[in-house]
Image (tube, rainbow, N blue to C red):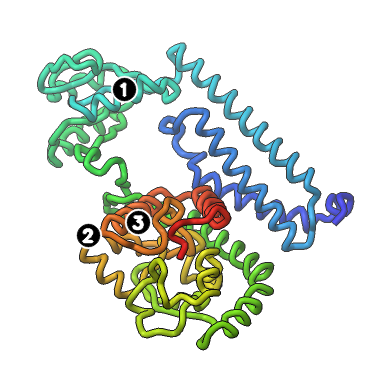
Amino acid sequence: MQPDSFTEDFKSKFFLLIILLFVWFFSGTSNNLYGEHRIRPGFSLEIYKTLKGTFLLAITIVLVSYFSHSFLPVNFVFIYSVLLVLCFGTEKYIINRFVLFLRQQGYNLRHVIILGHGSSAQQFKNLVVENPHLGYDIIGYFDDQNTEEQLGPYLGKISDLEQYLPVNKVNEVIVAVPGITVSEIEQVTNVVDKAGMRIRIIPDFHFQFYNRYEFKQFGNIPTVSLRKEPLEETHNKFIKRTFDIVFSLLVLIFICSWLFPLIAIIIKSGSKGPVLFKQKRLGRDRKEFWCLKFRSMYVNHDSDRKMATKGDSRITPIGAFLRKTSLDEFPQFWNVLKGDMSIVGPRPHMTVQNAQYMEIINNYLVRQLIKPGITGWAQVNGYRGEIETDFDIKNRVSYDIWYLENWNFFLDIKIVYLTVWNIFKGEDKAY
């Protein structure tokens, strides 16, 4: 499409606008660009998140343009992306500096007091002091003992809180009392509510889980999840599934369409047996599916019980090449398109391996909370192929669970890039 026709075509512009709005919404939501401003990280990280969102938007423009046959000039995509970063970044910078200036002058501050002492209270205090852009001012702290810790002025015992709040300018009460009971929390909450102020409670157990836990509402019941799972969020599922569909379609259309017949002929001419090898593997939520691969071994009775090892006599000459280049995995792009697998995720294991590893690793099945992948975080970190020791599988599972807890779209892009790089570089365990 020529630039002139693009400017005149209202339907194309309107369709593109709707797509871009949806993509920006999902990108902004997943990057937490519109969360509560007082608990956001610093300005530099906000700009980084803006760049990520803009990059995703630029990719979307190109893909929408390609599949709708309304080809946009490259300079439009580039200029649009640059202007978006500049405008959005300038807006955030001006607002950030203006708000910081106001807070340094004593305006727009949220005055808080701390209940309790110890590591939780000290950590909160350090966070406020080291991040003035958050706009918190610690007035002092209440505790049943004057511990003389550097939390601010000692204001009295916790029982004195009820008399203090109504006659002082306080916006929030931070409860960081070690070992506080439910009944004590209710008493403090009643006192703070009566004064018409906000209350935040730092749970006494939060260090035990290394900040992995999340509070979520289940109906009207508050619950604590001890593991962050970004892929349980609807917008993240949408982003990952869209990437899976688009990427697998591109590979199947532009690579597999001509590569599959060629590999099939070579496999059939080299040894007897089917072109494809299929095996039941565990998918998300422990549901079984048929995992597809190009057959790289002679037909044998151990294929469902014994994984490939270095110098394995079962591997055919063409199979050795397919495994070395990872071409044997390409039929799994069909598994991805069907929804059984993802481009990136924990590698699925044989049934006999699952039973074995469950006995070794207590949290082994946690990796089945998400879809298995053609490649994964463990694989690009050196844990692919043969599992020789318990140490290997324990590290592989650790990487898989880390991926589950820290997923983001750009992590998937990084893993795909590293996978391709490793194929060309060559890997010791690619056999």
Residue 163: x and y, percent? 18, 20
Residue 243 in the image: x percent, y percent?
Answer: 57, 59
| Quadrant showing the C terminus | bottom left
Name the kind of residue labelled 2 in the image.
Answer: Asn
Amino acid identity at mark 3 = Arg
Whether residues under marks 3 and 1 lie with C-beta atoms below 8 angstroms apart, the answer is no
In the visual, does 249 lie left or right of 140? right
Report the residue marked by disc 1. Answer: 126
**Residue indicated by mark 2:** 362
Circle 3 sits on which residue?
396
Q: For numbered disc 3, what is the local secondary structure?
A: helix
The mark closer to the camera, 3 or 2, is 3
Q: Residue at x 20, y 26 (%)?
A: 115
Measured Cα–Cα span from mark 2 to mark 1:
37 Å
Say whether residue 249 is left or right of residue 379: right
Give the percent coordinates (x, y) of residue 34.
51, 39
Name the residue rendered at 52%, 58% in the picture.
240
CA gap, disc 3 to disc 1? 36 Å
Q: Residues within 10 Å of mark 3 (few under 14, many from 20)?
A: many
Front residue of this view, candidates 218 and 431 = 431
Query: SS for tag 1?
Result: helix
Vertical order, 148 against 228 (above or below): above
Q: Amino acid at mark 1?
A: Asn
Circle 2 or circle 1, nearest the eye: 2
Picture layout, residue 40 above or below residue 165: below
Q: Is residue 374 visible?
A: yes
Q: Residue at x 24, y 22 (%)?
A: 165
Q: Position of residue 86 (x, y in %)?
A: 67, 32
Query: Helix, strand or loop at disc 2?
Result: loop
Question: Is 2 situated above or below 48?
Answer: below
Q: Of residues 129 and 420, which is closer to you in this image?
A: 420
